[in-house]
Structure formats: C-alpha cells, structure tokens
Image (spheres, coloured by chain):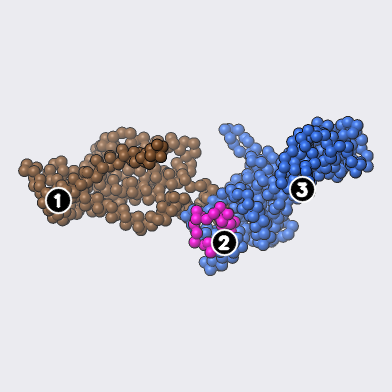
Chain colours: A blue, B brown
C-alpha cells in the first residue's frame, strides 16, 4: 500500500453520494439511500440504528465486502471504490469475532502481518506489544475455543489493531457478551482507542453504548442518516421524531402555537395546561409543533403547581403507573395534553414515592428543556 | 420407578445394535480366526490344529496382490481428493438454495446397482466402445492401445464408485465454515488463493481425513472393479480371498488373508492418523 500524506483535514473515511441497492426476488431494495458522510482522523464514530437500518451495509462498504451501487468511498482522500477488501487498509472486528478456529492466539493476531510480508522478528515484537495492550499476554498458545467470550473479543481486537489500519471497523463487537463484561469492555475499548489513536467506526443498535463511547454518532433509519452529531446533541436535541424515540426515552407532545413571545412559543391545552418551547424565527401563531421532553428533566408535584413553575411548562395529569428502579422511580402520567408522559424521579432521599397510582399531579419543567423536533 | 427405568433405558437402547454387532461381527471374527488356524479340506472336513504357518504361506504367495491392492487404493484415493474437493467446494459455497439438489445429483447414479454400474463402464471402455473406437478410427491411438484390463481401468472404476464417499464428508466440513471467518481472512490482506490455502483448506481437513478413511479402506479391499474391468494382471487381494473361499474352498488361507488385509489396513490407517496429527484434526472438527 502506498502511504499518502496524513493530513488532519483529510477525513479518514468519506462517502460521496453513496447508495446501495440489493436485488431481492427481482426487486430492487434500497439498503442505503444517497449518503454523504465524513469521519475524521482518530474519531470514535458510531453508526447507530435498529436492525435493517443500513448501518452494517454502510460498514461493509467501508471494509470492501460490499460495493456501492452509486457514489464513491474514500479512505484518507483516496478513492477505494471497487478495491478488493484485502487491498484496503482498514480492518474489521466481526460480530461473534470470526477468529480462525485452527490457529492459536499468536497465529490469529500475526495473520495480517504475515500477509503483508512483515519480518518475523518485527511480527513477534508487534504481536507481543498489542497483546499487552489488550491484556492477553501469556495467552499466545491458546486456541480460540479455549478462551472465554471476553478473551476472544480481545483477540479479535488485537488481530485487527496490530496492522495499524487507517480505521478499525467494529460490527456490534460487544453484542455476545453479558452486561457486566460489556460495560467493562466499553471502557476498555475507549482506553485502547485513545492509546492507539486510530479511527474507530462502531456499529451498534445499543444507544447506551453509542452515547458512552462515541465522539460522534450517526443515527440511521431505513437507509438514511436521520441525525449526525455528538452524543449530547443527539440526546438533547433530537432532529426527528425517530431519533427522539430511539435514543433514550422521550415524551413527545404536539399542539398548535397560541403565542410567540421573546423567542418562546406557547402551546395551550387548557387555561392551566401549557407547554413552553424555545422557538425558531420561523415559528408563527397557529403552527403545529412537535415537542420532545426528556423524562428526567420533569418535576412532579402533588397538589397545585408551585409558583417556581411560572414561565415554564405545566401539565396536569393522573398517575397511571409507578415503577421503582432503585436509583430512580418512573411514573407514567396521563396528561391534559393528550399524551402519556414518562417521568424519572431520582431517589435522592429515602423518602416515600412522590405520588401513588391514581393521584392527581402536576408536571413542570423549564422552557429550555422543551425541544422542537423535525423543524 | 422412574429412576430404575432411566437406569435400564440406555442399555435397552444399546441392545439391538449391540446384539447385531455381537452376532454379525464378533462371532464371525472369532469363527474366522479359528478357521484360519485349522487344517484339512472340503471333503474330509477341517480340524483346529493351531497351524499358524498358513499365514506366512498366504503372505508369501499373495504379497504381490496385497501390495497392488494398497497401491490401487491409494492412487484412487488421491484422485478422489482432487476430483471431489472442487465439487464439494462448489456445492458448499455456490450451491445457494439448491445445495440439497446438487448433493442428490452426486448420489443419483448410486441408486443403480454397484455391479451394474461397473459393467456399464466395461461397455464404455472396451476396444469397440464409444470411447476408443472413434479415436482409433481417427488414427489418434494405436491398434495396441487398450484401457479395459489395465490398472487404469480398475482405478477409474474405483474412483467412480467411491466418489460420493469423498464428496460428502468434504462438503460437510466446508459447509460448516463460518463465512465470516473467510471474510476475516480477506479483511486481513489475504487474496483469494491465500485465503483458500491458509483458512479454507485447513478447516476442510477433517472432511478430507474422513473421506480418505471412507474410500481408501473399501477401495483397497474391493474385488468387483478388478473382476469386471481388470485382467489377471490387475488381480486385487479381495478377488483372491473371494476365489479361495468360493472356488478353491481353501477356508484357512482365505481367512488368514482376510486377517492380514485387515491388519495391514488398520496399521495403515493408524500411521496415517498419526502423521496427520489426529488430535489437531479432531480439535478442529470438534470446534
């Protein structure tokens, strides 16, 4: 492989007008619709979405296992469209690892370097080095089936990283691990990524995983990137109803604008029930809006709404469900706005729950916690 | 009650197979061993004398046929690997939804009797048959060129008759390879040829190993192919044993030869397993 200039500005991976169709029973099925995408050098980038959203196809086009129907795939500014997988300087960590069952840890990890005709002594040095990074020193002679899932996972990671690829592609790499191990590996992966400084492209359907690890996330649905941004942006400011629903829990309420005042739009349901949302310039009285509110931003009160809620949103309702979760208690409240709301209340004190099923309650939250979606 | 039943159940399940083996395998083996150590003839009857010299005589009289049988078996097995691997590979990786159909096609000729199929080859390979006649007419082969009656014809018959026994185990091994493991090799800079050499073939080895066992042993002891397609120059040990039993009624020699053949094949198989490293092969197979 030729080594092009490594520029900070050149994206590690770039999609230019890429789309991908599959032929299924004589019908063309779009897997990825026209997509432009740029992933930066050293970035931890996640492709997040439900199964069948096109995230795996997107990754396989980077690896070279699928070719786009149209458009170009660029690695470090070089067009690699049509270049075979074995000639692309990216490596993949497969779902369920795909280790070579007939080779031991050392042979598995050395496989790529041997193909690149790296000197034996150099291979042995680099394999030793990477096994130390993934904490597998001493496991060189083990066969894959003699190791636990977590260890196999590390071998898969080392096997890819040892080649120092332009980018590492990870296809739901933690999916087969149990919860404890998964959380541990999430932290470990992040550490390893910082240590090696390689671009990571991470495919997952687990929003929690994507939020904790990524620098940026592309949320995909039905072959389209619905939103691309930092975890905070995506969580706090979901661009579409799909994103709001897919990432964490959202309360979504719609209504018509009664008044726009000082950058805030007011949606009234009764004389008392109202939602206040920061509005863009274009919002006019009478417009229909969709507003998303995160459950942990909402305060729940029994009796009359407190005076502190003045200027913010207030919705009255009846508690229909109370679920105790240890760190928090989740309430479901049927509101005057017509939508059922979920409210997370942190169990900061060991006091009793704020309300019981059937209680009449008021939900309040500050204007900045309302977010207009899809505008 | 249930507990007692559960304790007996496994033995009951083993019983039919066990009895079968005892009656049709263990008993005849002992009878044959005893027969090989008897002396006498068909008219006056045989008596047990512990005459082990029958073995040394049988070996020195028929060593040519024993060695010839092993060579024919080995050559046929090698050709079978070369022929069966691509077939199995194609079905496993390119068979798509029709895999079962293709496997059935491989087996289809074997719904016709073994002997009948071998006799058909005779018709094909004979000097006046559809293969040689036109070639000779065209002057492409000399008058003295024959296939029938030569080792080539016998080995060809063996290869033809044992093909499915090589295709099926290799197919099973290839079919079990995780396609993602193949992709992983491509991802790690292996071109298609290296991927085959370093990943696919090693993972198919348990299938080749099983195929060799399933073809080499019966091919070496076969007596139909040489009988139908060969000549006195191609006599295999199976034919000798058959002739001693059925034509000469020399039961001790026939029994002794059977044991010798069995022993030689067992030693061969064990050596082969050792060289190939059964443990590694089994490890891969058991993954």
Q: Does the magenta stretch include residue A158?
A: yes
Q: Name the chain letter of the residue that bears numbered label 3.
A: A
Q: Position of residue B278 (x, y in %)?
A: 38, 55
Callout 2: 10 Å neighbours few (<14), some, many (20+)?
some
The residue located at (28%, 55%) in the rendering is B267
- Choose top left, top right, bottom left or bottom right for residue A309: top right
* Residue segment shown in magenta: A138-160
Main secondary-structure element of the magenta-colored stretch = helix
- Choose top left, top right, bottom left or bottom right for residue A306: top right
Mark 1: secondary structure: loop
The residue located at (14%, 45%) in the rendering is B251
Q: Mark 3 points at which residue?
A: A350
Q: Position of residue A138 (x, y in %)?
A: 53, 64
Q: Do the residues labelled 2 and 1 touch (CB within 8 Å)?
A: no
Label count reads 3
Q: Where is residue B209 in the image (x, y as percent from the top left)?
A: 37, 50
Q: Are marks 3 and 2 in contact (CB under 8 Å)?
A: no
| Up/down of A156 relative to A335, above or below | below
The residue located at (59%, 64%) in the rendering is A132
Q: Mark 2 points at which residue?
A: A136
Q: Name the residue under label 1.
A: B37
Extreme-bottom residue of the structure:
A121
Extreme-front residue of the structure:
B1
Residue A79 visible somewhere in the drawing = no
| A293 relative to A134 in the view: left or right | right
Q: Nearer the viewer, mark 1 or mark 3?
A: 3
Task: Give the CA separation, mark 1 to mark 3.
Answer: 93 Å
| A252 relative to A18 in the view: left or right | right
């Amino acid at each position: 492989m030729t080594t092009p200039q490594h520029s900070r500005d050149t994206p590690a991976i770039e999609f230019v007008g890429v789309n991908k169709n599959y032929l299924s029973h004589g019908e063309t099925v779009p897997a990825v619709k026209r997509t432009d995408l740029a992933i930066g050098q050293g970035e931890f980038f996640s492709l997040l979405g439900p199964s069948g959203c096109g995230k795996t196809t997107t990754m396989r086009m980077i690896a070279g296992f699928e070719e786009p129907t149209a458009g170009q795939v660029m690695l470090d500014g070089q067009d690699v469209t049509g270049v075979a997988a074995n000639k692309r300087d990216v490596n993949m960590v497969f779902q369920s690892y795909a280790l070579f069952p007939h080779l031991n840890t050392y042979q598995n990890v050395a496989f790529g370097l041997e193909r690149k005709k790296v000197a034996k002594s150099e291979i042995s040095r680099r394999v030793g080095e990477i096994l130390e990074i993934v904490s597998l020193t001493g496991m060189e002679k083990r066969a894959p089936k003699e190791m636990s899932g977590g260890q196999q996972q590390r071998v898969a990671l080392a096997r890819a990283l040892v080649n120092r690829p332009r980018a590492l592609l990870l296809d739901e790499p933690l999916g087969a691990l149990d919860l404890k191990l998964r959380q541990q590996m999430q932290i470990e992966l992040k550490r390893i990524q910082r240590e090696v400084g390689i671009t990571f492209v991470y495919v997952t359907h687990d929003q929690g995983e994507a939020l904790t690890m990524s620098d940026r996330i592309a949320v995909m649905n039905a072959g389209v990137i619905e939103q691309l941004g930092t975890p905070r942006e995506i969580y706090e400011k979901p661009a579409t109803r799909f994103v709001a629903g897919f990432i964490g829990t959202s309360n979504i309420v719609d209504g018509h604008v009664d008044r726009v005042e000082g950058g805030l739009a007011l949606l009234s349901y009764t004389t008392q029930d109202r939602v206040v949302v920061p509005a863009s310039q274009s919002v006019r009285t009478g417009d229909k809006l969709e507003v998303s509110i995160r459950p942990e931003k909402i305060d729940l009160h029994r009796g009359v709404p407190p005076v502190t809620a003045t200027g913010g949103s207030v919705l009255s309702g009846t508690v229909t469900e109370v679920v105790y979760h240890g760190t928090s208690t989740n309430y479901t409240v049927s509101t005057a706005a017509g939508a059922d709301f979920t409210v997370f209340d942190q169990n900061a004190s060991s006091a009793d729950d704020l309300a019981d099923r059937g209680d009449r309650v008021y939900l309040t939250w500050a204007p900045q916690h309302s977010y207009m979606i899809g505008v | 009650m249930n507990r007692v039943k559960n304790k007996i159940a496994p033995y009951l399940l083993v019983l039919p197979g066990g009895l079968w083996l005892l009656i049709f395998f263990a008993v005849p083996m002992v009878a044959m061993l005893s027969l090989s150590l008897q002396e006498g003839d068909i008219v006056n009857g045989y008596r047990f004398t512990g005459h082990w010299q029958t073995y040394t005589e049988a070996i020195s009289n028929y060593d040519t046929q024993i060695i010839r049988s092993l060579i024919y078996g080995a050559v046929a097995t090698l050709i079978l690997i070369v022929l069966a691997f691509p077939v199995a590979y194609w079905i496993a990786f390119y068979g798509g939804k029709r895999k079962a159909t293709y496997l059935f096609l491989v087996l289809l000729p074997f719904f016709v009797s073994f002997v009948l199929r071998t006799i058909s080859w005779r018709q094909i390979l004979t000097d006046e048959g559809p293969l040689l006649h036109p070639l000779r007419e065209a002057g492409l082969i000399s008058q003295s060129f024959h296939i029938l009656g030569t080792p080539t014809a016998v080995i060809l018959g063996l290869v033809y008759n044992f093909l499915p026994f090589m295709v099926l185990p290799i197919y099973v091994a290839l079919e079990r390879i995780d396609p993602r493991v193949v992709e992983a090799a491509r991802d790690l800079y292996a071109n298609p040829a290296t991927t085959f050499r370093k990943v696919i073939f090693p993972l198919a080895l348990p299938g080749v190993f099983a195929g060799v066992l399933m073809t080499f042993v019966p091919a070496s002891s076969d007596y139909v192919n040489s009988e139908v397609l060969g000549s006195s120059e191609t006599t295999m040990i199976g034919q000798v044993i058959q002739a001693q039993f059925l034509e000469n009624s020399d039961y001790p020699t026939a029994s002794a030869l059977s044991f010798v053949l069995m022993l030689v094949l067992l030693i061969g198989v064990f050596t082969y397993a050792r060289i190939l490293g059964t443990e590694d092969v089994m490890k891969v197979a058991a993954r």
